[in-house]
Structures are given as C-alpha cells and as structure tokens.
Image (cartoon, rainbow, N blue to C red):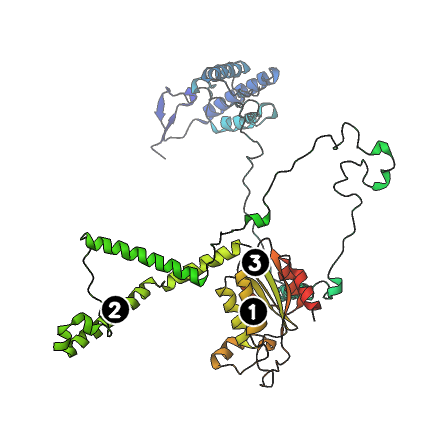
Amino acid sequence: MAGEKRSFPGDHGAANGTKVPKSGGTPDLAAARAAAAKKAAEISARRAAAAATPPAASQPPAAAPAASGAAQDRLAAMKARLAAMQAGGAASQPAKTDTAPPPRRSEPTGPRFATTLGNRRVESQSPATVPTKSKAPAPKKEDDAPANPYFDPKATGAPRGRMSRGLIFNQHGKYLDQASKLRAQNRLEQIKAMLAKKARQEGLDENSERGFVVQQPPDVEWWDEGILEEKTYDCIDKPGKVKIDGDDSIITLYIQHPAIIKAPQEQRLVEAKPMYLTHEEQAKLRRMRRAADLKEHQAKIRLGLEPPPPPKVKRGNMMRVMGEQAIADPTSVELLVESQIQQRHDDHVKANEERKLSKEERLAKLATNQEKDAQKGLYTCAFKINSLAFGKHRYQIDQNAKQLALTGVTLFNRDMNLVIVEGGIHSIAKYKKLMLSRIKWGENDFPSETQQEKQAEDPDWMRPLDTQGKLRDLSQNECVLVFEGEIRQRAFRRWGSKICETEGEAKELLGRSKLDSLWALAKSCK
C-alpha cells in the first residue's frame, strides 16, 4: 500500500483534483486537530440547515399509461431531476424513481473521509429521508386491451403444478368380490334366459278347445262411425245425433261405383284345349297327310329336283326286285338285303333318339309344366302322421315334395307330426296319392351304419330303435288328411322341416305364416 495514490483532501473527491503522493513522515498533530474541528463545525452547520429546511417529500411516480411514448418518459425524468435539485443539497437525497438516475455532476461534493462517509450513511438512514419503494406499474386492465370476441378470460388460468400422489393399496379380497359379483350376474342372466325359453316352449294354452279366442264385438261398427256422433248405439233414438239427412252426412243421392277388379279365377292361366278325335278319325288324317307328302315327293322327282330313292328291298320282294342277279348269286343278294334292312332299322332308331329330349330339356319342360300348373290355381293339404321314426318315410316325404315343386314344412313332434304342402292341382294330387296310398306307414327296419351316423344328433323319439335297441312298433302308425282346399297365395317360400320339442314351438312357427289353427285342428282330429 506504500505506492497507492489518493485524492487531495481539499479536492473533495473531484475528478480533476490534484493528486499528491502519500508522505511517508508523521503528520503534524496540531494541524490535523484544527482541520478536524473545522470539519465538525461545517457538519454541524449543515445539520442545522437541514433541520430548518424540511426536505421535499418524495413523490411517487404515477403509473405510466399503457399508451405513453418515449417523449413522456423523458419529460417525467426531467421533472424528477428538477425536484431533486430544489430539495437541496447534500443533506437530503432525491427519492428513488423508476427513471434513470441523474449524472454525477448534479451530486453535492464533499470530503471523502471515513467519518464523513459514516455520517452520510446515518443521514441517509434517517426516517425523513427514507426513500419509498417504487410501486410496480399497474397491470393493464382488460378494458384497455383491444376488444376480442373470441377471448375468454376463464380459459387463461395459472398452470397447475403436478401434485404427487401417495401409494394406494388394494384392499384384501377386492377382486374376489368383483369376480363373485360377475358370476352372480351371469348366473342371473342364465336363469332369466332359461325361464324365457321355458315359457316360450310351453306356449299359451295347449288345449285345442281354448286355442280359439273369440273377441268381443266393438261398441260401434266401423261402417256406423261416420253416422253416429257418439261411440255407442244408445243415441239411435235421438234424431239429432244421427247424421242421415243433414248436409254433413255421408249418405247422399249419388251412387258410388267401385273400381272393377278381376276375380281370382279370371287371373288364372286358361289354355284352349283342342278337339279330341276318335281312333278312326286320327288314322284317316294320318293317311291323308302321308299321301300329300308322297305326292309332293313324286312331283319333285319328276321335275328332277330330287334323285329317285333306291328300291326298298325286303325278304319278300328280293327275287322280284333283283331278278337275274338273285338267281345267279342268291347268297350275296341275301347279304345285301339284310344289310339294307339293318340300315333302315338303324336310321329309324337314330331318328327317334334325335327327337328325344335331353336330361336338361326334360327338367326344363317339367319345371315349365309345374309353373303353368301353379298358375291355374294354388291348393294346400295338411297331413297328420303319428310317428316318423323310420328314416325311409322322412326321405319319401322330403324328396317327393321337392320333385313336385311343392312348398311347405314338416313339423316333427313327440306326440304327432304335421306335413303342410302347397302347389298346383296336379302336384297336390300326386302328393296326396303318395301320402294316403303309396307309403306303407306301418313298416320299420334297422338303420345302416351311415344312417346311424346321420341320426346320432336326432332325439330319441325320431330313431327307429328304442332305448333297449329294439325296433319300435309302428303297426298302429297312420297318415290322416286334416285339411285341403284352395288358397290365394303361398304361405311358405320354400320346402323345409323343423324339429319342435314342444307344442309351443310348433305353434310359434306356424303363427308366423298365420297357420297356427292347423295345429289345433290336427290335434283335435282322431
């Protein structure tokens, strides 16, 4: 620290003061005391002046408006500096503002001794000169911001901090309780489904006597609703409540002629049948047709349009036609005649085969005839069969219905079986003959291995063998015609079969086609 330089004490820390090197000798004690006494007197005078003149109160800066510019900021800074200079001097310090501090030349000058610096710190901490904290600028109001129709102040919230969650342990038996509840719920659903199935199988009332429900007659028939003002016939005796002669009555002098529609029988396909001829008339027409064809053929031969046919040699006219050749070589002539006879036979057979229809043509012709037969009128038949345990009976019922282009259904039940068929009169007549005459319902036989595999999924009452492996006794089995008649349209789209464990299922199936009354009719038929 011997080479350190410091400012001259009389310069009061000025930047342009004359700096002298520190003297290494001992200072004069009397001169130092005199200088200290002089400084103490000056400080006392400054304190007295500061106590006599109160310092200017620091004015807090007004909050600058949101739209103030740089010019207003500079003007406020200048006003603050002028107020600080007027407040005066070294005893008081200007209040702190948000503006920039004044330059160093505006600060009061003074000695920079340790004592003076300490006194200045004490004076600056006096309550009269304690600067007030500058207030933060007021936040902008929402009204000052430009109007934004899409701005929602509730949407802009403070970000939420992540809160730490503690450990949560599952209680003992929590998932066991959940599993038991699920099992109980599944069991309840199974019970509900079983009860619903049982109620559906049982049906309403199996007794045929109670199967027909007669509805009560209405209070007013539909054809009288437009005449009566009330919904009962009690107002018939009151002429004012019966609309017969009034202007608003539906009864007028005019006659309503409904649109004429064709009767069901007029919509059928009716073909004009040709006149039938006797055998003599048919033979006469054949002779006349053949004579005309022969005459035309001979005319073409005479004109040279066709070559003459070779002579038709037979065993009877062989000697007359062949003449001398037959006498010279009868063996070769006989072989020639036999070959011609065989050729004529082969041509005849070939012509017949060419006239025959192929399998596809026969099926197409059969389908066309069956369709024409159905266009002439639709008929239905219902058959009741006691048992269809023999598989041959089921096969005959199914295949013949398909071959005759019939629609309907076969219902298999433990108590009885019902067969319903629909189709043309020709197909129905053939099927009726099959069911009532051709099939032997009393026969039964052991099934083959293939049949046993097919019947493995069938119920016990549909198998030809009983539980003991013996043939069932079908001697009392029979087929009865329950109903037959003409219908307007088909109730079934195709032919099929259905196994019904209960009568309720059979009635429900027939009820879809509005034929449930046939089941009650078949049950009442003995």
Q: Residue at x 86, y 40 (%)?
A: 234
Q: Residue at x 73, y 59 (%)?
A: 212
**Percent x, y of residue 346:** 26, 69
| Precedes in sequence: disc 1 or disc 3 | 1
Q: Secondary structure at mark 1?
A: helix
Q: Secondary structure at mark 2?
A: helix
Q: Residue at x 59, y 49 (%)?
A: 264
| Residue on which the image places disc 1 | 433
| Residue 476 visible in the current orientation | yes
| Residue on which the image places disc 3 | 492
| Precedes in sequence: disc 2 or disc 3 | 2
> How many marks can you see?
3
Q: Quadrant of residue 140?
A: top right
> Looking at the picture, which amino acid does disc 3 mark?
Phe
**Label 2 vs label 3, nearer the camera:** 2
**Label 1 vs label 3, nearer the camera:** 1
Q: CA distance from mark 2 to mark 3?
A: 54 Å
**Percent x, y of residue 237:** 87, 37
> Looking at the picture, which amino acid does disc 2 mark?
Arg
Q: CA distance from mark 2 to mark 1?
A: 44 Å
Q: Quadrant of the N terminus?
A: top left
Q: Secondary structure at mark 3?
A: loop
Q: CA distance from mark 1 to mark 3?
A: 22 Å
| Residue on which the image places disc 2 | 344
Q: Quadrant of residue 41?
A: top right
| Precedes in sequence: disc 2 or disc 1 | 2
Instruction: Judge left or right: residue 363 versus residue 176.
Output: left
In the rendering, which numbered label is found on residue 509? none
Tell me whether circle 1 and circle 3 mark residues in contact (CB < 8 Å): no
